[in-house]
Amino acid sequence: MKLSVQEYIKKIPYYPKAAMYGSEDGWVRLSSNENPYPPSPEAISRMMDELFCVNRYPGNESELKDAISKHYGKEPENVLIGNGSNEIIELSLKAMKHGTKNKVVISEPSFAFYEIASKIYGYETVKAPLVKMKVDLGVVRDCIDDHTRVVFLNNPNNPTGTIFNGEKFTDFLKNLPTDVLVVVDEAYGEFVESRAFPDSFSCINDYPVIILRTFSKAYGLAGLRIGYGVGEKSVISFLDRTKQPFSVNVMAISAAKAALMDQKYLKKVLNNNRKGKKFLYKALKALSVEFIPTEANYILVKIGSTAESVTKRLYEEKILVRWMGSYNLDEYIRVGIGTMDENIVFVEVLKRIL
Ligand SMILES: Cc1ncc(COP(=O)(O)O)c(C=O)c1O
């Protein structure tokens, strides 16, 4: 059988998925920036209730929109729920399709799916290199021209864990040409400790921005696939029109609402992340291994020329970390902050390998 496709489809890169051996015993999974803890018991209980109702299509999105909008002091029309925040990345590109403006600006390195999604929808991508491992909004601004339609800003940036601050963000928005959508992906926003982090939600009515958050990270629901976007009502309505009906399942919606209500769980997760971060910083310093201080739940660690083989050695010991070769950072690995037990095992094995 012979089936032809357009050339641009053949050029779409595959998403660099991490190896997934998580459900088997004994693996330490620090490769996908996941929450190492099971979800909130409230979320599990709501999922169990919903199990008996899956003969019905999901009718509960509006309850979650209410909860999210209250959480941020907004209105339900400011909120869009997606099948992971990845779906909202796609919806932004779908809704913004335009006859002559066909460019997307992306920091490099940053989250791999921005480029993949842009290519799926036929956009040309323009890369704004990081400066000293940070997103530099001046460099991003210089990449924007009359053909730019969408800009992706990842804050904290994956894989570096670094942030840009509120002042720079406001300046950037003030100097933006008209008719460009800025997608601010704050997938790791809950983990940020720095007070300089922008209050991006306060910008939605003054600038064409949409803020993305997810239940996959701090709320521990990655396997359910649910995230959300917050933006000005008309922007949300444009994206919503391009969304498949019922793209988010009923269990995910109910669990996400319960997770959002369980701020005690979130506090515990953030506390453990803080402790794990301190522990790993200290251990890496003791090993004279360089790393980039992070505002997220992962650390970019500079191993040097042996980074790939160290990743393989860790794998042989059932520890999964991400070698950053696919991000053009050959000397680095990205290590998720795990439970304290996992962090200790990682450090002990790394020490032995090095
Ligand atoms: C920066 C960033 N944005 C978005 C996502 C995707 O999140 P979701 O699980 O909500 O689709 C990830 C996942 O790793 C990420 O790192």
Image: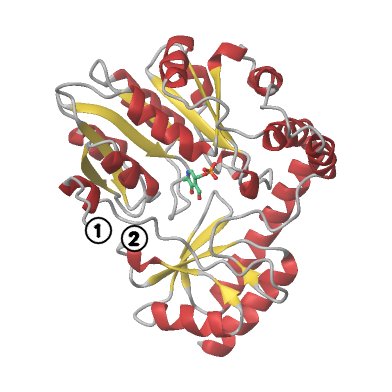
Say which of 45 and 346 sits in front. 45
Name which residue type carries label 2. Answer: Tyr
- The residue that disc 1 covers is 1
Type of amino acid at the residue the image marks with label 1: Met
SS class of the residue under badge 1?
loop
Question: Which residue is nearer to you in this view: 28 or 166?
Answer: 28
Is residue 11 in sight in this rendering?
no
Q: In the image shown, does 58 or 296 lie closer to the viewer? A: 58
Q: Position of residue 53 (x, y in %)?
A: 78, 32
> Can the viewer see residue 279?
yes
Q: Quadrant of the N terminus?
A: bottom left
* Left or right, residue 9 beside residue 220: left
SS assignment at label 2: helix
Crowd tier of the residue under label 1, counting other residues whose Cα lies within 10 Å: few below 14, some 14–19, many 20 or above: few
Instruction: Look at 28% across and 22% down and name the residue there.
Output: 180
- Find residue 327 and name its label: 2
The reply, left or right, for residue 177 in relation to residue 289 is left
Front position among marks 2 and 1: 1
